[in-house]
Image (spheres, grey):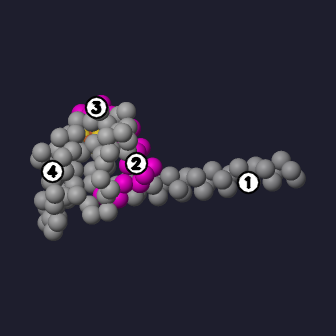
Amino acid sequence: MLQLPHQPLPVAAVPPQRAPVREDEDGPWHAEAVCRRDEAGLFFAPSKEPTAARLAREEAAKRVCARCPVMVDCREHALLQPEPYGVWGGLTAAERRVVLARRRRREVELRKTAAAERIAQAG
Ligand code: SF4
C-alpha cells in the first residue's frame, strides 16, 4: 500500500478503514504531492458534511490538484487501488467510479472485438 499524499489528515476526515501509512511504502510521486500537508482538510469529507459544503470543498481540492505536478500518477493510483474516498488526481470518488465504469465497458468492447476477429480469421 502506498503512503497517502494528503497529510496530515484531520482526524474527523480519516476514513475508518484506511490503514495507517508507513514511510517505507511511500511511492515516488508522493514526494511531489502538493497536498502533502492538507491543513485545510480539503481532500476528505468530515462527517455529516452538508452537500453545498462538500461541493465547495471538492472544487477547492480540484483547484489544488490542477496545479499539482503528479496529478496523472495520483489519479491512476486512485483508480487502480481503487481509493473509495476523497479527491485524488482532481477527481472525486463519484467521478472515479464513472471513469472506472467507462474503462470496464471499453475493455469488454475490446474483448468482444478481438473475439469476433479471431472467429472471422478462423472461419
Ligand atoms: S493530484 Fe491532488 S490529490 Fe493528487 S497528489 Fe496532487 S494535490 Fe494531492
Does label 1 or label 3 sit earlier along the sequence?
A: 3
Q: Is mark 3 within 8 Å of ligand 1?
A: yes
Mark 4 to mark 2 CA distance (whole Å):
22 Å
How dense is the environment of label 1, judged by Cα within 10 Å: few (below 14), some, or many (20 and up)? Answer: few
Does label 4 or label 2 sit earlier along the sequence?
A: 2
How dense is the environment of label 3, judged by Cα within 10 Å: few (below 14), some, or many (20 and up)? Answer: few
Task: Give the residue type that dot 3 points to.
Answer: Glu
Mark 1 to mark 4 CA distance (whole Å):
48 Å
Task: Give the residue type that dot 2 points to.
Answer: Met
Q: Which residues are magenta?
A: 67-85
Q: Which residue is mark 3?
A: 32
Mark 1 to mark 3 CA distance (whole Å):
42 Å
Does label 3 or label 2 sit earlier along the sequence?
A: 2
Residue at image position (15%, 50%) is 41
Which of the four quarters of the rendered structure image does ligand 1 lie in?
A: top left
Q: Which residue is mark 1?
A: 115
Front: mark 4 or 2 = 2
